[in-house]
Image (cartoon, coloured by chain):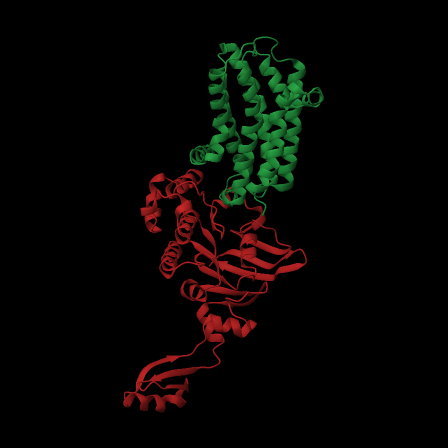
Chain colours: A red, B green
Amino acid sequence: MNKIIRAENISRDFAERRVLDGVSLNVKKGEIFGLLGPSGAGKTTLIKILTGQLEQSGGECEILEKKADSLTVSDRRRIGVMMDDKGLYSRLSVYENLKFYSDIYKTPKSEIDGILKDTGLIEAKKTPVSKLSKGMKNRLSLARAMMNKAEIIFLDEPTSGLDPVTTKQIHKILLEAKNSGTTVFLTTHNMYEAQNICDRISLLSGGKIIEEGAPKEICEKYDDRGNLEITLTDGDNVSLKNGSSSAQAVKDYLEKNMIKSIHSTEPDLETVFIKLTGKGLEET
Amino acid sequence: MNNITAIFKKQLLDTLKNKTVLIQFLMFPVLTVIMNNAVKIEGMPKNFFVNLFAAMFVGMAPLTSMASIIAEEKEQSTLKILVMSGVRPYEYLIGVGSYVWIMCMAGSAVIAAAGNYEFGEAALFLCIMAAGILASLLIGGSIGVVSKTQMAATSVTVPVMVIFAFLPMLSMFNESIEKIARFTYSEQISRSLAGIGSTGADMKGIGIVAANIIVFAVIFFAAYEKNGLESD
């Protein structure tokens, strides 16, 4: 698959502080790529550099095979962006916001209702943006980012602070976008989001990429426990090595009908992150 | 052209819901109509309120609304998203600028109507107002471009606006102020308006207004070059 986003040795300094330090990554066409890291790791800085909002202090980055800081107007039309600060017109209604952007993108107005239905905003069509909940604003911002049928969508913390239902709706929209060929680049500090919807991720800490790959592969790579956790019907928990040496013990429990639950103990991304950095994803 | 029209239409829709900007466009035209009809004092110069409020309108409305609109778009990041959506900065500035200019010209037409001018006089009145509005637009645009928030824009707009809007009135009562005010566009606009039907607009006055416009245009482009529109 083609590399649609390429960052090579990106660094960015703010005054004396180095926020990004030698970040390199490649995003393939049609995948959902997640940049996972705690607040302050440099995620928003990187997304701003990739979208041409900020210049890097060093390194190179390319979007759609062009340098990010030299994208033309027509290149920008191929990119959708949803930033943390939304950028919605608060006095205008949901429909009026999208109608304005349909004028800018020259997309048919007849498509607006479809987009509103897809994002679950059709009922709030006439509501001013100032009266929307945070989740609805996120969905509207996402709708706007997607309404020009962009080839790449950049999303900065799209589900931050949202309830599980809204988060699930947004994930559904992103997976549908991926299925229609759109490349999604998102930042998140939510490991479940990264594990559930991302094809590949990079773990960012202190401005450096500390691990990258498919979430499952990363988890398996750091699975040094390899245990089976068994909860017995009498409430006891048993931990066995996940291998042939434990086969007899598991067989005995099964024969005695003593197993309430059994699961393997491969680490999740949070555990991997803690292992690599010594701190959690929610910590700053 | 498509983007400019879209921005113009959006701005029109937004203003109808934005009392702060709407009042800038309505206040002086409405005030002129009311005062011109309600206050009749013997010996008062012809169209006294028309000339007074027209000069204030020129100094206030375009300046404050232009600065406020740009600063608000920067503060709410809507401008950043617009530029990332493929809108060129100049398209945005022309869209907003032409919108403010047309709204102010509409207000000027109301003020002209209150003045009961003949057709030629009304046309001259609107030409003078058009030049004044352009000068104020450039000042307001410069303030909007350098300000990151509406609050920051207001803190600069208010003193600048007070100077330009009130100089013509203050210069009536103070000779020293008049000596300085004569080099400002608002004073010259005020004098030219007062001269409609009698002395008209003199070449010196036109020259001063043109010089003001050139200076403000240079300031605007310098501010734009330094700050751009989408800077964080």
Above or below, A65 against B229 in this view is below
How many marks the image carries: the answer is 0
Which residue is nearer to you in this view: A238 or B40? Answer: B40
The percent position of residue B223, horizontal first and vertical second, equals: 64, 37
* Residue A32 is at least partly visible in this image: yes
* Residue B106 is at least partly visible in this image: no
Above or below, B231 against B182 in this view is below
The residue lying at 53 percent from left, 62 percent from top is A39
The percent position of residue A211, horizontal first and vertical second, equals: 53, 68
The residue lying at 36 percent from left, 89 percent from top is A247
Residue B148: image quadrant is: top right
- Along the horizontal axis of the image, is B222 left or right of A246? right
Above or below, A83 against B189 in this view is below
Which residue is nearer to you in this view: A52 or B154? Answer: B154
- Along the horizontal axis of the image, is B222 left or right of A4? right
Residue A61: image quadrant is: bottom right
Which residue is nearer to you in this view: A22 or A171? Answer: A171
Which residue is nearer to you in this view: B178 or B213? Answer: B178
In the displayed orientation, state which residue is furthest to the top.
B198
In the displayed orientation, state which residue is furthest to the front.
B42
The percent position of residue B186, horizontal first and vertical second, equals: 62, 23
Residue A158: image quadrant is: bottom left
The percent position of residue A50, horizontal first and vertical second, equals: 55, 53
